[in-house]
Every structure is written in structure tokens, then in C-alpha cells.
Amino acid sequence: MTGSDTTHLLDVRGLVTAFDTSDGVVRAVDGVDFHVAEGETVALVGESGCGKSVTALSILRLVQAPAGRIVAGRIELGGTNLLELPEVEMRKVRGAKIAMIFQEPMTSLNPVLTVGYQIAEAVRLHRGLSRSDAWKEAVRVLELVEMPDAAERAASYPHQLSGGMRQRVMIAMALSCDPRLLIADEPTTALDVTIQAQILELLDSLRARLGMALLLITHDLGVVAERAERVLVMYAGRVIEEGPVDAVFADPHHPYTRGLLRSVPRLGRERGPLATIPGVVPKLNALPKGCRFRDRCDAAVAECASVDPALAPLGQGRRVACIVAAAHGGLRW
Amino acid sequence: MGRRLLRNPLAVAGGLIVLVLFVAAVLAPWLTPYDPSDFDAAHVLEGPCALHLLGTDGLGRDVLSRMLFGARVSLMVGFVSVGISSLVGVTLGAVAGYFRGVVDTVLMRFVDVMLTFPTFFLILAVIAYLDASIWNIMLVIGLTSWMGVCRLVRAEVLSLRERDFMVAAEALGMKPSRVIMRHALPNAMAPVFVAGILGVAGAILVESALSFLGIGVQPPQPSWGNILTEGKSTLGVAWWLSVCPGLAILITVLGYNLLGEGLRDILDPRLRSR
Amino acid sequence: MLSYLAKRLAGFVPLLLGISFVSFLVMAMAPGTPVDLMTDLNPKASPEARERLEKFYGLDQPLYVQYGLWLGRIVKGDLGTSFSRDRRPVLDKITEALPITLFLNVLDLTLILGLAIPIGIYSASRQYSLVDRATTVFVFVGFAMPSFWVALLAMMLFGEQLGWLPISGLRSLDYDSMSLLGQIGDRIRHLILPVGIAALTGLAGLSRYMRSSMLEVLRQDYIQTARAKGLSERVVVYRHALRNALLPVVTILGLSIPGLIGGSVIAETIFAIPGMGRLFYTSVLMRDYPVVMGITLIGAVLTLFGNLLADLMYVAVDPRLRNR
Ligand SMILES: Nc1ncnc2c1ncn2[C@@H]1O[C@H](COP(=O)(O)OP(=O)(O)OP(=O)(O)O)[C@@H](O)[C@H]1O
Ligand SMILES: [Mg+2]
């Protein structure tokens, strides 16, 4: 579909993840397509509740049954469809080939185990090291993430560490087994602004050093511009625009992306009033027919009410799910 | 609320049990042709039959009638003890939350102390002084089970007291006590009510245990507990004397617990989905 | 840890005072003077006993002085003398019966925990499965079951009908003539019914609590982290979730101690076990007030120390409370 014949590190096709709720079945992820190449940083952005975290959890097959389940799609890692792997094999992927960092460093570490133990545990599991070697390895990765007094800190419990330090522990844990892909789900949202920059810088430099790919989920478009090569924009369970960050930011094709970019104060655009996208995200169990963005769209045409647009390639690695934009080969807004 | 209750089948079952028992207790004299204390020397320890659906006891009394009248005892003990404990708990809790400071500290330490006593010990100790009678039992159970409600009401009153509009109300010359009565107490009523329903179950269990041990409701007044006592002495001979009252207690307590838990789920959304 | 212990123990002082005060009040509130009441209702109390009592309680003094005097004696370990025919010091009678009660309760608790924790874990990790549903039903029924009734039925079945197990006491009449192995077997056979029934009825509440605590923990972020590491579900549950799920169970354990101790009265009376519960029951029947008051007091103190034990366990499991 992308027209490229190189196999990507990660290839997600038509992913649908649904939850049973008291209001019926909710398709939190509803036909998501994207890929991540070796060593690249891809940003995943979108409003709260659009399905970013669920997408990330689906990749690791950590969506909690029985309420949640992956209904359709393929998730290929280096050519293997993860959705077809038996659970035992999938466990060898988690932590080893794909690692994940969560949003809340305060609650993402087990309060009754030392951080060293929690890191060493992964090392022992995936790299088969002995207890003492794994501990040494844990201390080494803590040093790698620039944890001060790493050897002592390894013996600390999470409550003895600050939020920034805990997130370093999470990063250390994620990197300890040398994964090919790191998924970071809003890794800095819960941190102080000053710490945020530090953590992102650390994450970026380690990614470059270790040559892994990074799927960075964030709300912060500034971060996207600074750190990512490509960006995926999600809306109500779908990827609606995709492309190189510079191109998308300079010239957004989808009306939603345009609105999203306008709603952020940016250098060089300071004078204009901050725009917000009118209306609210439709409920996932009561999506409108046709394009799911059309009720909030200022460019909608009559056809939008009947056609549910697919993500269509526009050249130069850009894709957009909007019939108006596609018809014009990309809109000039 | 009513509709949500109806959607919870366990709570509905509990409610039905409670309702049936209530009706049975009220209509006891009309539901059975026998007087529960009529001796019948010709029909001693007879098993269940058409004449005596649940058999007769060692004195030839109809067990079904005694069970029905026992239901009255259980019902009364349950509701009167819970009434007493709610009254004490709500009053002391409101006082502690309202006056705060020393009064609150003293009352709360008192609650701590009361909670340290094994309740059953305290009940027995008091019964050692008083005579065992249904009234004393109800009083003692009530006076030893108010602590939970007290804490609940205190927390509610305290949180209201601390809010800005109380200060405003006082500044406007409204009596704080009126505000408490108007707002805090109604707010606290839902959990107090749930605690009360569950408390009825607890009181019935305690009463039957006391009566079973011979220090509760005294024969010839029938209670499920003291029918069981006779069951104990005729263990191998008359199974119905030990099976029926026990089952009755089980079903009753189950009914109140199911109803109480169902109500709690509805009233406290945080606990739902468990 | 030590300073924590010291702080806790210091907190006990006002509580102990309160406990003694309530005990004293229960006594003082009884109609008539305690001595009138005791001697009137207890034909076994001789005039000497009456005199001794009046002195013991300092009845000529105002109430607070009486309380002070009484407290002074209690602190010295003098709980008075029993009204019963043997006229023994109350403390002696209690210390004789207490170990049996403690032993039984510890046994009950061990069994309850040993069963409730695995049951709770199992039904939490398979929420809404058949086993989980069955457990829920058992829990509701078990919770409503009067323990004395279950005891009665078990005695009827295993004692009378089947004749498998003894239904009273802690040892057989011919215990002394048995071999060592036989003696041990005899003890165990006597313990099966009382301990089994206590466990059965105690199990319901605790396994339910364990289940909901486990469910709560399994929803936490750090469990997701553990799974994202590639750990097997078994390691996630036992290494990562269990200790966290045990914390609230420890608390509830501390809170359930008074009920457990109180419940000894019923169990020991039914199975004729010479522990503190039965001593209490017989003392109530005979209106042996010094023993009644003594046991009430000791019951509260036991609860207090049980709570302390639960707290220490909590600290041991939760590093957040350590190094205070
Ligand atoms: N366990 C669940 N049960 C039911 N619905 C769920 C569950 N988890 C997620 N959802 C639904 O899926 C949708 C997407 O959730 P998700 O957490 O992926 O959003 P998000 O894009 O990560 O938002 P945020 O930026 O706030 O993290 C939400 O609308 C939510 O209602
Ligand atoms: Mg999210």
C-alpha cells in the first residue's frame, strides 16, 4: 500500500480493537494503518481518547480481555504477524523486541519491589543472566540513563525516587534488553516541565545510540516537530493523516490536522488568535455515517456524509483520509 | 434507584426473602392452626407430616408455629437493635463532627476503645448483670454496634462543616445545627441505611447465637436460636429440630445481606463493577 | 522500625486506660452496688466474700477513687478471686484457659488464610469464570451461615451418624494410655471439627476480600508494566500482584481479631473445649463477675496486641512504611 518494497520493522494493517462496555461495543481503534521503519522516530498524535494508548497496547497484545480484544488486522514485526503468535512466543517479544514506557511514572513501578529488581527481572528473563549478573546489568543501564548513584539507587523502592528518576528507571527497564522498537506513551506528560526536556533528550540520544526505532505518543506538537521524523495523526480510532513531520506541519492536508496545528501556539504564528476545533469528538459507539470528522469540518462537502474516506497516498510518503484533500492532490489551506 | 435495584438479581432475591419473612412474621397467628406453646403429649417428637408440616418438638408443640413466631422475634430483635445503634451512632457522630475539637477527640477515642472489645464478650458481660430477656438482648446488641455508623456520620458532618458555605451560612445568621440537620444528615443517610440493613443480619445472628447458648430469648417464648438448643439435645432423634431453625437463620441473614450489598452497590458507584 | 513500635506502644496507653474505664463502667452501671448484686444473685458468695468485695472495690469511696483503686490492682495483675467454689485467683483461671484459645485461634487463622488467599487469587485471575461464580455463591452462603448451626450439623453427621470424629473436648478419656503417635492422632481428631468449622465460616469473608483486593491490584499500572516486560501471568500474579493485594487483607485481619476471639465462646461451648471462651460462658451463667470482667479486659488487650501484630506485618510487607 505504501508502494515501498522494503519490509518495515513494524507494519500495522487494518487494526481494530474493541471493548465491551455497558453502552455496547466500542471500537476504540477502528482500522488503523501505519508502519515504523528501523531506527526512525514516529510520533503518534491526536486528541485525548482517540485511541493512541489502545493502539500501543494492541501492538504488545496487552489489551485486557475479556472486555477488550483485537478484532481484526495484522501487526507485523520484521515480517511475523504478532497476532498469530502463541502467547508464549508473544512473551518473548514483549520487553525483548518491543519495549514500552508508560505515562505515569508514579504508578507504573511496583511499590513493593526495588527498582533494581524490577529491571534485573527483565534481563534475567530475556537474556538468561544469573541473578547477580542481572543486578550488575541493572546498575549498568541505570548508569546509561544517567541515574545519579546508580548502584545505590538500584536498591531503592519506587517511593524513594522522584518522578523524573522513576521515569529514568522505566526507560532503563525498557532499554535493558536492547529492543528494536520502543513505544513511549506520553512519557513526560506527568513530569515537571524542566524534567520533561531532560527525559526527552535522554530518550532521543539513547535511541540514536542504540539504533532502535521509537514510536512516540504525545500531545505536544512542539515535541513532535523537534524529535520525530514522521507523524501519524489519529482521530476517533483512525489514522487520518501521515507524513514527514516537516511537510505535514508546513502544509497539513486533513482539515483536522490543520485545526490541531492551529490550536497550538507556535513560533512565527504568535500574532494570530488561537483557534479551536469546533464541536466534540463523536462517541465511538455512535459514529456518524460517512466521514467521522465531517460534523466538525469546515471543508465538508455533500459526499462526506456517505463516503468513509480511506487513508490514500498522495506521494512523498504522505497519506490522508479525506476525499476533499485527496481530490485536490492535497489542499492548500 | 428502584430500576437499578431491579437490574441486580441478587438484590431482588434478597428483597423478596426479606419481604416474605416480614409477611410471615406479621401473619404468624393466622398462618398456622396451632398455638406455638400448646403442649400435646400424644404427639411428641413427630417428624414432618401433613398435620405438622415441620414436625413437633419434645413437648409436642408444632415446630412450624414456633418457627413463625420465632420469625417475629428475629424481626423485632433485628430492627429494634439496629434502631438503637443507628440512633446512638447518628447522634454521637453528628455531635463529634459538629463540635469538633475536644468533644470529637474524646468521642472518637471512645469509638476506638469500643472497637477493641470483642463485641460478643461485651454483650455477654452485660448479660451477666442483667437478666436474659429479649429486651435486654436488643438493648445490648444496639449499644455495642453503633461505632461504624458513628464514624460514618461524623465524617459526613465534618466535611460539610469544613466547607465554605457553612461559614457563609453562619455569617448570615443561620444556625449551623440547622444546616447540619438539613444537609449533612440526609447525605449520610444512604450509607447509614445500608449499614442498618446489614446490621439487621448481624443482630439476628447474634440473637440466635445467644438464644442457642441459653442466654438470649428464654423459653417458652420461641426463637430460632432456642429451638436449635432443643435440636442439640435431640440430635440423632429429631433432625427437623436442628435443620429448620438453622436454615431459617441462614436464609434470613442471606436475604438481608444480599439486599444490603445490592443497595450499597447502587448507592456507592465506586464499589460497583466489583 | 523500632521507633515505630515505640510510637505504637505509646499509643496503647490511652486505649488501655479507655478499655479499663469501660470495663469498670459496665460494672458500676449495673443496678445496685456490685457487691449487693453479686452476693444477692450468687448464693455461693459468702459474707466473707461480700466483705472482701466491698474492700476490693473500695465501695465507701467516690466512683473515681474506686476506679483508681481498681486500676491499681489490675496493673499489678490482681484481677480478684473467682466466686466459684474453687475460689481461685481470676488470673490463674484465665492463664490456664488462654493458651488453648490462642492455639485454636491461631490454627483457625492459619487454615483460613491458607485457603482464602489461593481461592481469592484464583477467582480474581479468572473473574466471572465458573469457579469464580461458584466461589461468590459460597461466600454469600458462608457469610450467612450461623457457625453454631453448622457445628451442630457436623456433630450430627460426623459424630453421631458416621461416628468418625469425637464431638467434644480436646482428648479422649483413654488418652493417657495411648502411644505417643496415638496421642497425636487423638488430638488431631478432636481438633478437626472445631477448627474445620471455624475455618469454613471464616473463609467466606476473607476469600471475598482477597478476591476484590486482587482484582483491584490487577488493574494497576505496574501490573501492565510487568506484563509489558514479557513476564508470564503466573509471575505477574504471584511476584507482582500478590504482595500488594495482601496489604488490605492484613488490615482486615487485624480488624477481625475481636470477632475471632468473641467467636471462641460459641465454638468452645459447643465442643466442650476448656478454653477462655467456655470459661467466660460458664462464668456468665454462674454470675462469676470477677472472671467475667477479667476476661472482658483480657479480650480487649488481646485485640490490641493482635492489631499491633497486624500493623507490624503490614510494615514488613510494605516498604513505604519502613525506615520511618
Ligand atoms: N478498558 C477499556 N474499556 C472500555 N473502553 C476503553 C478501555 N480502554 C480504552 N477505552 C476507550 O478507548 C478509547 C481510546 O482510549 P485511549 O486510552 O487509547 O485514548 P488516548 O488516545 O490514549 O487518550 P489520552 O491522550 O487521554 O491518553 C477511549 O475513548 C476509551 O473510552
Ligand atoms: Mg493514552
Image: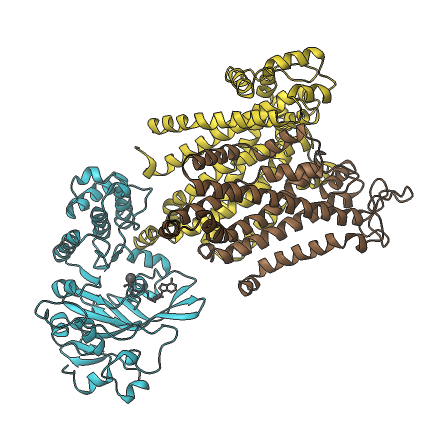
Chain colours: A cyan, B brown, C yellow
Q: Residue at x 68, y 33 (%)?
A: C270
The quarter holding residue A300 reads bottom left
- Kindly tell me whether residue C197 is visible in this rendering: no
Image side of residue A120 versus residue B253, left or right: left
In this figure, what is the number of numbered marks?
Answer: 0
Q: Residue furthest top?
A: C48
**Residue C196 in the figure: left or right of residue B74:** left
- Between residue C293 and residue C143, name the one nearer to us: C293
Counting from the top left corner in percent of width and height, residue B107 is at: 48, 35
Q: Is residue C228 above or below residue A73?
A: above
Q: Position of residue B137 (x, y in %)?
A: 67, 37
As drawn, the residue found furthest toward the bottom would be A302
Residue C256: x percent and y percent? 52, 38
Is residue A103 found left or right of C235 in the rendered image? left
Q: Is any atom of residue A186 visible in this view?
A: yes
Q: Residue at x 56, y 45 (%)?
A: C204
- Residue A248 location in percent, x, y? 15, 74
Q: Residue reaching furthest left?
A: A268
Ligand 1 positioned in quadrant: bottom left
Compared with B104, A197 (above or below) is below
Taking the view exactly as shown, the residue that stands out farthest to the front is B173
Query: Can you say whether C268 is above or below C236 in the image?
Result: above
Quadrant in the rendering for residue C269: top right
